[in-house]
Amino acid sequence: MGGITVENLSKRFGSVSAIAWADLEIEDGEFLVLLGPSGCGKTTLLRCIAGLEQPDTGAIHLGERTVADGARGLSLPPRDRRIGMVFQNYALYPHMNVFRNVAFGLKMRHVGKQEIETRVRRALEMVDMTNLANRKPRHLSGGQQQRVAVARTIAAEPEYLLFDEPLSNLDPMLRVSLRAELKRIHRKLGITSLYVTHEQTEAYAMADRVAVMDNGTILQVDDPQRVYHFPATEQVAAFTGNPKTNFVTGDVHYTGERFLLIPEEDPYCFVPLTKECADLAGRAVMAHVRPEHLELEPNPAEDEGTVEVMAVMPQGADTLIHLLLGDRGMQLLCRSDHKSASRIRRGMHVGIRPQRGNLYDPVDGTLLQSFGYEQARIADVAVG
């Protein structure tokens, strides 16, 4: 079988550039998640790989086979690519029961009756739907219907699996359980898979690697933890945060005793940094700190400046604390455990202590320095 390789691919629809430039390599047997906001080009890229769209430039290779090449005008039809695709819309036939829905594509390919029976039973067993084989789609839940759609794809025995936001129509609790099901199926089949989503949590939970896409360009391809903790650009950092992440632009200063970030929004609010930032002393940066990596000091020193607490909002396992920096309305967010948050009240002025974060160039958004991380132990750091 092999992996999937996309080289220098671009795609336009009239005057709109859906994919500006895309290079992507999915390893044999890998489950790669393509993550990005709506309209970023991720579904267009998926459809180009499937053969449902023809790229304007670039090439697509499935294993050793070249299935699309813009320079040569080559584009194999979907039926010749040996790809299985699971869509957002289940597209089940309402007049057919589960078994016949799964078998329909095989019948159209003139597969033998006994072979159809074997494949359909095996596929239904894999998605735990054997006992519902005689039900019509209207008698199934949304999650069960999506399982039938997956079984239909598996029964065709594809060499590659593509998923176009297949869980987005389901309620949050059901999405969580089906994520685990899809990963279990992937591990069992070992098929090279590409999964498209705009949900960061879904990407982190399911992916072997995550490819972050925006404005028609793939910005970073990496291990999920590294994408979360070490975003390659400010753009990636902004998108891969839930709740929203914190950005503070300012200058790095060295006082002879400590390194400080002096924010543009409030030059009297000194934010402590680590010695890892020594090479950036004297230059402007954009500091990025996840809410869970921002600690608050209820009793700050007189010379460090403070931020104002706007709201303290418990939410299940933790508490979100909304902060105001400076007098131009810039808001920051801290995610804290309940014990620490119990010391904080609305209207207080507190110091801020970033424990981990990244510094970016404020002009082009490229990563300059990460701080507060133990590089050797990053594999042990849980995604927040």
Image (cartoon, grey):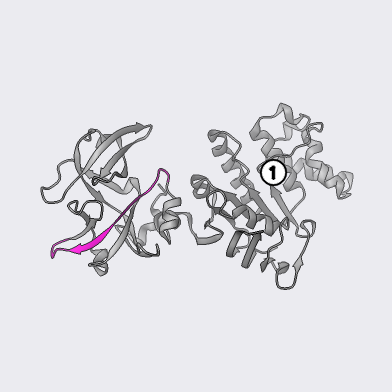
Residue at x 82% of width, y 37% of height: 100
In-front residue for pair 356/270: 270
Name the image quarter holding residue 341.
top left
Quadrant location of the N terminus in the rendered image: bottom right
Q: What segment carries the magenta color? A: 242-258
Q: Tell me: 83 left or right of 249.
A: right
Residue 115 in percent (x, y) is at 85, 47
Can you identify the residue that label 1 sits on?
150
Q: In this view, does 331 lie above or below 359?
A: above
Helix or strand or loop: what does disc 1 sit on? Answer: helix
Query: Whole-percent x and y of residue 149?
Result: 71, 41
Q: Can residue 128 be seen in this view?
A: no
Residue at x-position 81% and y-position 33%? 96
Q: Is residue 170 magenta?
A: no
| Left or right of 229, for residue 118 | right
Q: Which residue lies furthest to the bottom in this view?
A: 71
Asked if residue 83 lies left or right of residue 304, the reply is right
Where, by quadrant of the figure, is residue 182 drawn? Answer: top right
